Amino acid sequence: MILKIIFESIWVFFFLYKECRLECIDIYSLNLQVYDWMNNRQERFGLSPSDAAIQLDLIAKVRGVSSAEDFFLRLPNTFKDRRIYGALLNAYVRNRMREKAESLIDEMRDKDYVTHALPYNVMMTLYMNINEYDKVDLMISEMNEKNIKLDIYSYNIWLSSCGLQGSADKMEQVFEQMKSDGSINPNWTTFSTMATMYIKMGKFEKAEDCLRRVESRITGRDRIPYHYLLSLYGNVGNKEEVYRVWNIYKSIFPSIPNLGYHAMISSLVRMDDIEGAEKIYEEWLSIKTSYDPRIANLFMAAFVYQGNLDKAESFFDHMLEEGGKPNSHSWEILAQGHISERRTSEALSCLKEAFATPGSKSWKPNPANVSSFFKLCEEEVDMASKEALASFLRQSGHLKDKAYALLLGMPVTGDELSTKEERTEDKIDNEENDGDNGSEMLVSQLQGSL
């Protein structure tokens, strides 16, 4: 039976490749096409509610939320169980559609589908992303009132919420409750989260204590904790620990992924150890299988910050010589340098490239850079360049974001708009995914705010 399923799966892939001439395709798109193909052959493949939930999630990721909603509405009511509602809720939260998420979870409550921690965790993630920490507390209170047990993710989110409110005491109280909960074993993500919060509060000694606990809880061959250790020790400014963790990491794993080198170089650059970062970069060049522009961006950003645009441009050229392909952030860094040197046309040219670069749909320019560019245009009485950037923002749909709309003096309304503060910039945004789970992604977002 298992061999039959394997052979049928291979046959489905071959069919899709032959019929669609697929050369390079997103894994989500491929999985969705398999489901579409199976849906057209329901007499052979009987799809379950679990399959429908997975398909809804894939549709939301590949075709957008509105398509996922259409799929949900077409399903028979008898088919819509907690998994399908949960998939739609997750799609709303992923896209920060607060009103729809809150309406849907109310419907789920009415159907008695909110009887475990997962939907609460999803909603708390939404409230964390829009800085409504009081709503996180309300979710926790509701769980307690309904005797719904908090899981490890619930506690980790709650810890984050307390920390982001600047309350070390409350965070420590939550941790004590967590320790007293016999069903919970604090993991490395717990301590990484607390370390991040202590760093934000300037409590470096407590942060380092948490980082030692992170290290003691690494199990198996999980690379991800080492990336956080490198990054957080860099935030603390402890260069000795950064190098110690790096050497341990390299002794355990025969090969380090780009993300590991990114974490190490980022920490060294943050501590102004450019010479050390360049040595690690040379090591990476000698073993890399592909050139990752995100690593070059670290150096370019450091040089622009130092006011050395020439050196940033030289590194950009070096990236091209090495076969690297600049991403949108690469172009934006150069634009920032040109803005600092009051070169309006050059900055606009770089921003134009940033918007045109493949993959730019997942990129948003830093509102501070947009503001600086607009200010420069006004000082230089260059309204044409200002309008050109406004046009790029409009065409890309970014004017739905308050951060950009307000810069243009536009009225902003609606649930789906977010401010600059509501958008947490992830330092490891769009990085290779080699093991992150939900709470680990939250830690990554929190680190981005440091």
Image: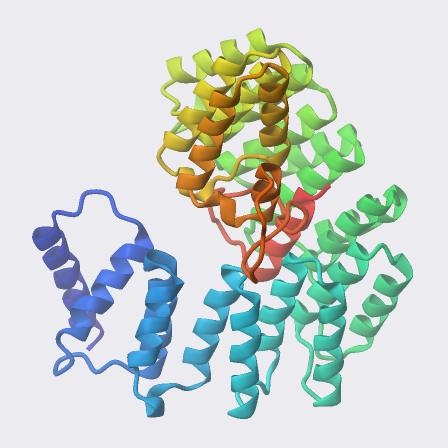
Point out residue 5 in the picture as x, y percentages from the top left corner: 19, 71
What residue lies at 39% left-to-right and 40% top-to-bottom? 395
| Observer able to see residue 1 | yes
70 left or right of 401?
A: left
Q: How many marks?
A: 0
Quadrant housing residue 48: bottom left
- Compared with residue 308, is residue 119 higher up or lower down, i.e. above or below? below
Point out residue 342 in the picture as x, y percentages from the top left corner: 60, 12
283 left or right of 3?
A: right
- Compared with residue 350, is residue 154 higher up or lower down, i.e. above or below? below
- Compared with residue 54, is residue 211 higher up or lower down, i.e. above or below? above
Quadrant location of the N terminus in the rendered image: bottom left
Point out residue 104 in the picture as x, y percentages from the top left corner: 51, 78
| Observer able to see residue 284 | no
- Compared with residue 160, is residue 197 higher up or lower down, i.e. above or below? above
What residue lies at 45% left-to-right and 79% top-to-bottom? 85
Quadrant housing residue 161: bottom right
Point out residue 72 in the picture as x, y percentages from the top left corner: 35, 77
What residue lies at 80% left-to-right and 71% top-to-bottom? 179
Q: Nearer the viewer, residue 312 or 407?
A: 407
Q: Nearer the viewer, residue 106 or 170?
A: 106
269 left or right of 350?
A: right
Quadrant location of the C terminus in the rendered image: top right
Q: Nearer the viewer, residue 189 or 427?
A: 427
